[in-house]
Image (tube, rainbow, N blue to C red):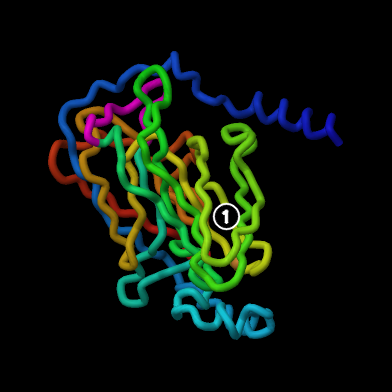
């Protein structure tokens, strides 16, 4: 078993090249532009999956789960505005070309905000989050000061099983009980795809957490709209988008994206997500 795990890890480490910090050069850019747009669904809106039947037969149902808000009692993989077909919870970010990194304004290198993922009843809130614990300064990753709190404000115990990438976050996956009215702080290293959070007590509970080493990201709102302010302009970068239901929305996976040089001022890019 030990050898098998070791062999798999060895193969993975060959297949996945973790960028070496020393090989990266600052991407030469000129000014700053905002990146804004809308993500819409192409196809029929997936049916809403009602979680109430599962909650009704769970011992925590009457005392906790069923007391949640409406959006805590449905599956939130697909949240689509019925009028505009805007898709919520799409993560949009930009990626520097290979062997380069993006400049970050000093004001965005330090952060005082905290990412909080709560479990107020029997659903993670919010469903999709982004955490920016470090930024890349050209040589190394430096802490931004941003913290991650995994909170249980419910009256029942939850469990959090975090599945992170085995290479980028070799020691950071965990599985812990979180008693009622308590919280834990954790951290992760940046990785290409989100860390998945689940609760083993309420098996329908699930959340996604992206971890980036830059501030150039946004999550689409209930109407599918997003804005990333102050992105380095004037040089080609890759615009990336991801949705839980389909994975990468943009072509080419983690090394792909939509290549574009932003102009100073406002830039617009829209995406469509194929319905499942
Ligand atoms: Cu739970």
Foreground pick, 209 / 248: 209
* Quarter-of-image position of residue 28: top left
* Quarter-of-image position of residue 147: top left
- The residue indicated by pointer 1 is 197
Quadrant position of the N terminus in the picture: top right
Q: As drawn, is 92 to the left or to the right of 195?
A: left
User: Dot 1 surroundings within 10 Å: few (below 14), some, or many (20 or more)?
Assistant: many
Percent x, y for residue 127?
Answer: 47, 61
Q: As drawn, is 137 to the left or to the right of 170?
A: left
Q: Residue at x 31, y 71 (%)?
A: 84
Q: How many marks?
A: 1
**Magenta stretch contains residue 66:** no
Foreground pick, 12 / 249: 12
Looking at the image, the residue that sits furthest to the top is 22
Residue 229 visible (yes or no): yes
Say what secondary structure mark 1 lies in: strand
Q: Residue at x 32, y 33 (%)?
A: 237
Q: Quadrant of ligand 1?
A: bottom right
The magenta-colored residue range is 95-107
Q: Residue at x 38, y 64 (%)?
A: 87
* Quarter-of-image position of residue 221: bottom left
Percent x, y for residue 170?
Answer: 63, 34
Label 1 near ligand 1 (CB < 8 Å): no
Foreground pick, 97 / 183: 183
Relative to 72, residue 263 above or below: above
Q: Residue at x 78, y 28 (%)?
A: 7
Percent x, y for residue 36?
Answer: 24, 51
Percent x, y for residue 160?
Answer: 61, 56
For the stretch drawn in magenta, what is the main secondary structure?
loop
Q: As drawn, is 179 to the left or to the right of 266?
A: right
Relative to 5, residue 87 above or below: below
């Amino acid at each position: 078993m030990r050898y098998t795990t070791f062999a798999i890890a060895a193969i993975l480490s060959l297949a996945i090249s973790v960028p070496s910090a020393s090989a990266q050069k600052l991407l030469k850019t000129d000014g700053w532009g905002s990146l804004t747009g809308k993500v819409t669904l192409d196809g029929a809106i997936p049916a809403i999956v009602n979680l109430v039947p599962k909650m009704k037969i769970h011992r925590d149902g009457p005392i906790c789960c069923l007391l949640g808000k409406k959006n805590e009692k449905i599956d939130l993989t697909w949240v689509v505005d019925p009028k505009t077909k805007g898709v919520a919870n799409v993560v949009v970010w930009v990626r520097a070309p290979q062997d380069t990194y993006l400049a970050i304004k000093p004001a965005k290198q330090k952060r005082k905000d905290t990412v909080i993922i709560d479990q107020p009843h029997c659903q993670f809130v919010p469903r999709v989050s982004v955490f920016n614990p470090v930024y890349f300064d050209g040589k190394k990753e430096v802490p931004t000061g941003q913290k991650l709190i995994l909170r249980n404000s419910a009256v029942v115990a939850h469990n959090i099983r975090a599945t992170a990438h085995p290479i980028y976050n070799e020691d950071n996956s965990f599985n812990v009980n979180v008693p009622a009215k308590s919280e834990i702080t954790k951290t992760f290293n940046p990785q290409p795809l989100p860390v998945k959070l689940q609760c083993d007590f309420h098996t329908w509970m699930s959340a996604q957490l992206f971890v980036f080493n830059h501030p150039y990201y946004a999550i689409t709102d209930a109407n599918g709209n997003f804005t990333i302010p102050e992105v380095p302009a004037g040089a080609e970068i890759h615009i990336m988008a991801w949705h839980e239901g389909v994975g990468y929305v943009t072509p080419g996976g983690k090394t792909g994206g939509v290549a574009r040089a932003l102009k100073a001022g406002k830039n617009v890019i829209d995406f469509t997500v194929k319905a499942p």
